[in-house]
Image (cartoon, rainbow, N blue to C red):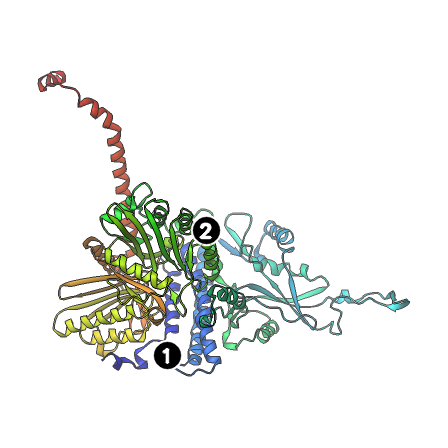
Amino acid sequence: MYKDFYQPQNYVNRELSWIDFNGRVLEEALAPENPLLERANFLGITQSNVDEFFMVRVASLHKLSAANVTTTDASGMTPKEQLDAVNEKEHGMVEQRYQIYNDQLLPELAAQNIQILHVRNLDAEQYEYVRRYFNEELMPVLTPMADDTSRPFPFISNNSLNIAVKLERDPESLHVKEHEILEGDQEIQGRSQEPHDENTENEEKFATVRVPEIYKRLVKLPGENQFVLLDELIKEFLSVLFPGYRIISSGTYRVMRDMDLDVAEEDTSDLLRAVQHQLREREHGHVMRLEVERDIDPWLENHLIKNLHVNETAVYRVNGPVDLTFLKKLSGMVKGHNELRYQPFKAHPDPRFDMDHNIFEAIRTKDHLVQHPYDDFQSVVNFIHQAATDDQVLAIKMTLYRVSGNSPIIKYLGMAAQQGKQVTVLVEVKARFDEQNNVRWARRLERMGCHVIYGLVGLKTHCKLALVIRRDEDGIRRYMHLGTGNYNDVTAHFYTDMGLFTCDYELGEDMTNLFNMLSGFARPRYFHKLRVSPDGIREFIDGKIDEQIKIAKAGSPALIRMKMNSLSDKQIIARLYEAAAAGVKIQLLIRGITCLRNDLPQLHENIEVHSIVGRFLEHSRIYYFKGNGHEEIYLASADMMTRNLNRRVEELFPVLESDTKARAIDIFDKMWQDNVKTRILHGNKYERIDRGKTQPFSCQEYFIAQAQAANRADKKETEQHQAASAFQPMTRHVSKLHLNDEKEDNAHD
């Protein structure tokens, strides 16, 4: 029975597993096969990853610990124990990040004449440039904030970069000559009261200066590819901001706050208003982490710790620049050096899905499976665009979880509404860190005439669905796109996701029922082919695992293959353990959190786990079952996480047609063969594959090559078609000639 595996030693803590995943991303900053500027980008990504982790996951642990919650997770750890373990492990990760920055990236960048310089190392021309830049650009914008008896410690906003300043009154400015002053109607000897005139003139004082976010962190210097950090430049000229005072020391710092949106939906009738209120309040969340420069003045550090109310374990002293996310911008600022970046490639645009073809006819003919970013996401955009402009389209229904800041899909949905089509859009305004963007789009869609839904009480709507209802010659037909990833035209360039275009009748009925559930009071009793969370996907996966167990117990080969972002659900893991113990072979592709161990003796080494971390972020979800000669493959928006299975609206759908099914299986096969960007789980630790003499194979590079080959084939076909078209007039002319063979032969003679 699967519940026999419900023992703490059989599970890995979710938060510690996430830190291990970020460590795999960090390995890419060292990987010699990655171009140098891309390695710098990976280092920046690890920083932004951990920032979000602290703002949400660590913040949640803080709240539980503060409430004295002592219940344990699947691995047997209380919130307080998890919090302590997370901080201990992350301190080690910080050391690794800065060691890579100082000992690897900076020297290798310098060898390519790309330099991030300290102000003290600038030559005379560069120093004059930054001095003028400060005086003309920065100084008018900067606002020093004091902390003294009349002005309390200022609020430090989340993720902002700041400079702490220790200063004292300049002794020379203290010698103010006494003179006659008018006090009421009397003239007396003395001096006028000055700003900050206290009895503590000789005491050390604290001030802070926020580094303005409107300027790039990397300031480009005269010359080729040389930069200085904005905060270091400001520190050099701080004295200009404090005339009459002497700067004793300064140091850069930043804080990460609790940014987890906590909307009590059951207490509000207007979810949108509640989200907007929470967005305003969120900025004032408790401090989860304080980062300071390692050599910061102890007096400044203590002042920050005291006033920000930070626990010592949450203070991170870094050996280099605070906040390494600026490295994500470095490649875009470096001129030339294309050899230090990934070679660009063009996604394959299926000609049947361009605006010159009837997309609905292509879908009516057969199902189409797409894999982004190798297949152009424009096919999805064109699907919505053509639906908006097609006179036969009656309605469009769509779910939006995350979209880009300038989404063409939003524009086409609005266009459809303005042309009289019925447009219903579910915009999930609780999508973490996209709340503000989604609130803005929801308002705009409403203004354009769309009917907007903001989600269900207590649930996030995470499914990725688009339904187009069209009046065809033979009646009403439903055209659909079902996906594993967001309708975001920007992230579609570097997230790997899969989608299915279909007009399958039963899936169409299921989609209609689902949208009725989302927009009204419908509670469908069952779905034909679509599986929907909460509950539906868990029940379906449980059933499929049970089927494979029966097959294995009957003595036949049974195989389960799953690809997901994270595996953390206690029950699903226990069921996989039960299947492995029964003899089912299990192959898992998990990019991130992995709470499963595969070294338990009861499993008989039947569980293999791979993790691919490479150029593109692996985001697609695939669930595959094979036994008794049958193969079934499903795609989904859901990971095997409790939140996806219990607290979100998610979809799982089958890939049924022979060619699309074969392609989906082949995609998994190719990912499983990867030996370049794959790590293999041993117990609870991932390790790189030792290829030995095996030929290297990168699945992402393979799919890129496939896309490029398809582009070449399309180009060749187009050229042949154009050449044939050019000769058609001559062909028609020659066909009217009536020369017999004999005359033709004589002519050749």
- Give whichever of 74, 300 is nearer the camera: 74
> Which percent across, then down, holds residue 397?
36, 55
Q: In the image, what residue occupies the spot 83% across and 67% down?
A: 191
Q: Is residue 405 visible?
A: yes
The residue at which mark 2 appears reads as 448
From the image, which quarter does the N terminus lie in?
bottom left
In the rendered image, the vertical position of residue 6 relative to residue 479, given as above or below: below
> Which percent across, then down, holds residue 502?
26, 53
Q: In the image, what residue occupies the spot 69% across and 65% down?
A: 246
> Which percent across, then down, holds residue 621?
30, 62
Left or right, 44 with reference to 74: right
* Tag 2 secondary structure: loop
- Give whichever of 436, 64 is nearer the camera: 436
From the image, which quarter does the C terminus lie in?
top left
Three-letter amino acid code of the residue under disc 2:
Met
Q: Quadrant of residue 299?
A: bottom right
Marks 1 and 2 in Cβ contact (< 8 Å): no
Residue 684 has which mark? none
The residue at which mark 1 appears reads as 73
Q: CA distance from mark 1 to mark 2?
A: 46 Å
Which of the two marks, 1 or 2, is nearer to us in this view? Answer: 2
